[in-house]
Structures are given as C-alpha cells and as structure tokens.
Image (spheres, grey):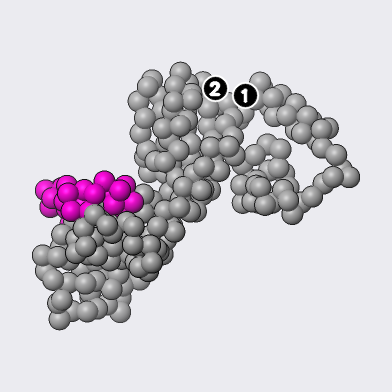
Amino acid sequence: MSDRPDVIYYYDGTYMGFLSCVFESFAEHEDPVSICAADAADQTALFGAKYIETDMKRAERVRVSIPKKMGLEAQDLLERAFLTCLPQREKHMLAFMRLGYRVGRPVCGMLADPVVHTLDKAVKFLGREAHLFLGFLRFAEYGDVLIAQIEPKNNVLPVIAPHFISRFSGENLMIFDRTHRLALLYKDGEPAILRADTVELPPESPGEQRCRAMWRTFYDTVGIEGRRNDVCRRTHMPKRYWRDTPELGHLV
C-alpha cells in the first residue's frame, strides 16, 4: 500500500464515481481511510483529501471485472450495497472487492468473514425496508399526478420503482424521498430519478380529500378499542412509517 495511510477520497456520489475511486485505489496502491461524497468534504480537514474525478472508461473497466472475477451475485450485492445506509459503505464495499478479487466467486458465500457479513447484513436491511414500502406507501391525487412521500433510511427508490411503475403504468407518478432528496418521476411512460431538495405540492383535489376522509372514517370505525395494542401495531408498522399515511399521520 501507499505511504499515505491517511488519504481520504471524495467523489461525486454516483456509483460510477465510486468505481473510479476503486480504480484509483488499485492503480495508486492506496487504501483510503474513507471514501465519501463531495458534499462531505468538509469532514476531511484532518486528512489528506483527494478528489477523484469520475472517469467512465476506468469505472467501466472495474464494473465489467466484477462479474468476471466474482460472479453476478457479487455484482448485485455491490450495486445494492451502494443504496444502503451503512456508515462508510464505500469503504466496506472496497474491502469486499479486494477480498473478491483475491478469492473469486466464492466470496458471497463467505458469511463468516466480517467484511462479507457486514455488507450482506446491510443489503438485507435494504431489501426489508423496500418490501415494507411496497405496502406502506400511500399515493395522493394532485390533478393528473399521483404523488407519494417517503422518508426511508436506505435509498430505496431504485428498488421500489419497477413495482410501482408496473402497477400504475397508465398513470403519471412522483415519489419524493425526503431523506435522500430524490424524486422518482414517471410521465408518459418515461421514468427518471432526479435530485430534488424540496417539493412544493399543490392543494389536494376535492376528490382526494373526500377519499381520505372516508378512509379515516372506515379505519376508525372498524377498529375495536378493547383490542387496541399499540406495541403490536408498531411491530408490524414502525412509527417512522406513520407520517405519510392518511390513517395514522395525525398521530405523529
């Protein structure tokens, strides 16, 4: 490794940008203590900060090498790991890739190895959270657009997008992720995930207001007060999901 053990890479925050960091690490024989997006660069004052430009040719060389050396399972694991909320996820991903290049295709099965276990655990959490949003996400009608807001811990939009696009293929959709400031837009059959710091919503349509009022009335009516169990409810639907539901949002 390099004589610079305190170097920190920062990059543009994209997956191809991360792969450019991987190329740099191997090419320069450096093992950065951290790899972080450019907006976190102010945290690197105590270390040698090194900005890595996204080089599509270099990143593509790394990308195609992953399934060749480690298999398609490792490729999928890394792409999903990049969407997780794992602290220092890029550093963990780089460690996994170093191990994978060394041992090859068996790497994903080495769950006793802390490097593999950490990444596998984070990806499973991503999958569980994405699965919950398939059931908990609520759309509201604003004109001719169905809009939903979420506040996930992981970047679940790329994971849940195919489900909702398939389910509402004839509609115009927007799902806004307040945590990661991203918005999934689907209009006229064309999907896109874009950066969006905030979203200012117009008033709900009268039909949407009536629908929400009827749903809340139904929800409150069918509930049996004597069987109310808040602990059980939070077990099946953690409280952090309540805010964006019409039936429970007023309790947050």
Can residue 226 be seen by looking at this rendering?
Answer: yes
Question: Which badge, 2 or 1, is on the more N-terminal residue?
Answer: 2
Q: Does the residue at mark 2 contact the one at mark 1 (Cβ under 8 Å)?
A: yes
Q: Examine the structure image and report whether residue 99 is included in the region drawn in magenta.
A: no
Q: Hey, what amino acid is under mark 1?
A: Ser
Q: Magenta region: which residues? A: 52-78
Q: Residue at x 38, y 20 (%)?
A: 188
Q: Nearer the viewer, residue 132 or 252?
A: 132
Residue 174, placed above or below residue 28:
above
Q: Residue 39, located in which quarter of the rendered image?
A: bottom left
Q: Residues within 10 Å of mark 2 (few under 14, many from 20)?
A: some
Where is mark 2, residue-wise? 143
Q: Secondary structure at mark 1?
A: loop
Image coords of residue 204 (percent x, y): 62, 28
Where is mark 1, residue-wise? 205
Q: Most extreme residue toward the bottom, as rendered?
A: 3
Q: Secondary structure at mark 2?
A: loop
Q: CA distance from mark 2 to mark 1?
A: 6 Å
Q: Using the image, tell me which numbered label, if any, was put on residue 193.
A: none
Image coords of residue 119 (percent x, y): 38, 60
Dominant secondary structure (helix, strand or loop) of the stretch shown in magenta: helix
Q: Nearer the viewer, residue 105 or 16?
A: 105
Q: Is residue 40 left or right of residue 125?
A: left
